Amino acid sequence: RAQVSSSRVAGARDASSRDMRLAQVAVLGAFIAYAYANASSLTPAALAVWVPVAYYLVFSYMDGTEYAFGKPWERFQRWRRLHVIIGSGKRSWFKPRIVYDDEKALKAAETRGLKPDALGGERCIFACFPHGVVSFHHGVLMTDTAGFMTKFPTFVTERRDLVASITLAVPGYRELLMWLGCVDAGKRTAKKCLKANKHLYVLPGGEAEQMLTRRGEHRVFLKKRKGFVKLAIEHGSALVPVYAFGETDMYHTTDFLMRPRKALMKHLRIAIPLFWGAWGSPVPKPGTLAVVVGTPMRIKKVEPEAITRQLVDETHAAFVDALRALFDKHKKQCGYPDAELEVF
């Protein structure tokens, strides 16, 4: 039965790849047909626009790499100009710092990640909270703006960040995210990455947590989010709790029209937070991001057919406890001594 199921998945994947290639050929053919039909009226200026657009649509926007391993660009991740946005320089808008709960344990986990599964290899799933309006703290872990890439290079270069499909549908922004190592948040893509020995960054709270964002409060949407836990059990991946103090202080939000916005979120899987930042604009308020990276929770691998609801629930409860403990342990040194973590 397992073999039949895996064959069906492989068949569906192959069909999806064929459909993508057919779509690429169709779009390219349409451009060529248009150019041929209007050859006499096409000016050099028109060609200068249409040729790059056609090339981008066919060979970048429709290449389907977001469902595989993306197209991370290490030089971009190390680019010093990114520090203008997030960095320790005087002109940096955000001043990030990373707090490690157990740096030695994290380095040991990175070392295990260099080995294949047959030799005791183990990948990590970094479960990051809170989502916030934009999730700027991911910029701290996806780049070297706070030294994370220097200290733990393969946690950046051999990592993929799962993001909502809608964000990868925006031309231009899609490329920016994929250069940083982002891929589609679908279950199939996540499994593909783990099987290829890639670490993962996930935002379990997703759009629901994004809608919960309120300045000055620490809310995570986690009680019903157990998919990432089951994924860790299935692949024997360590779970690393991450909490970013300051993420929810970048914007003011409002509950205005919350009910219809939640309805849209439920049916379209799109969060529409109403927010404003510095000077009442979409520009976030400057501040300090304190990203606390927890100690990896090692998870015993269990075959998919042997995973029980009880096992998932117990592992999920242990993770919630670890996140709470991480929050309470570091909140004072991160500037939030009286903060309380709310789990929804």
Image (cartoon, helix red, strand yellow):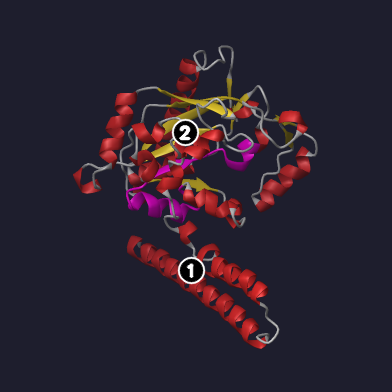
Amino acid type shown at disc 1 = Ser
Q: Disc number at residue 145?
A: 2
Residue 122 higher or lower than 8, as above or below? above
Describe residue 252's horizontal placement relative to residue 120 as left or right.
right
Is 195 one of the magenta-colored residues? yes
Residue 188 higher or lower than 233, as above or below? below
What residue is rendered at 47% in x and 38% in y? 80
Q: Secondary structure at mark 2?
A: loop
Closer to us: 121 or 291:
291
Query: Does residue 193 appear in the picture of this structure?
Result: yes
Q: Residue furthest right?
A: 257
Closer to us: 222 or 91:
91
Amino acid type shown at disc 2 = Thr
Q: Tell me the quadrant of the picture where the N terminus can be found.
A: bottom left
**In x, y percent, where is residue 146?**
45, 30
Report the span colored magenta.
181-210
Query: Does residue 222 appear in the picture of this structure?
Result: no
**In x, y percent, where is residue 298?**
32, 33
Mark 1, other Cα within 10 Å: few <14 / some 14–19 / many ≥20: few
Mark 1 = which residue? 16
**In x, y percent, where is residue 76?**
46, 46
- Specify the quadrant of the image occupied by residue 91: top right
Q: Disc number at residue 176?
A: none
Describe residue 125's horizontal placement relative to residue 338 as left or right.
left
Q: Earlier in the sequence, mark 1 or mark 2?
A: 1
Closer to us: 169 or 212:
169
What residue is rendered at 47% in x and 73% in y? 18
What residue is rendered at 43% in x and 41% in y? 78
Is 168 one of the magenta-colored residues? no
Q: Tell me the quadrant of the picture where the C terminus can be found.
A: top right
Q: Secondary structure at mark 1?
A: helix
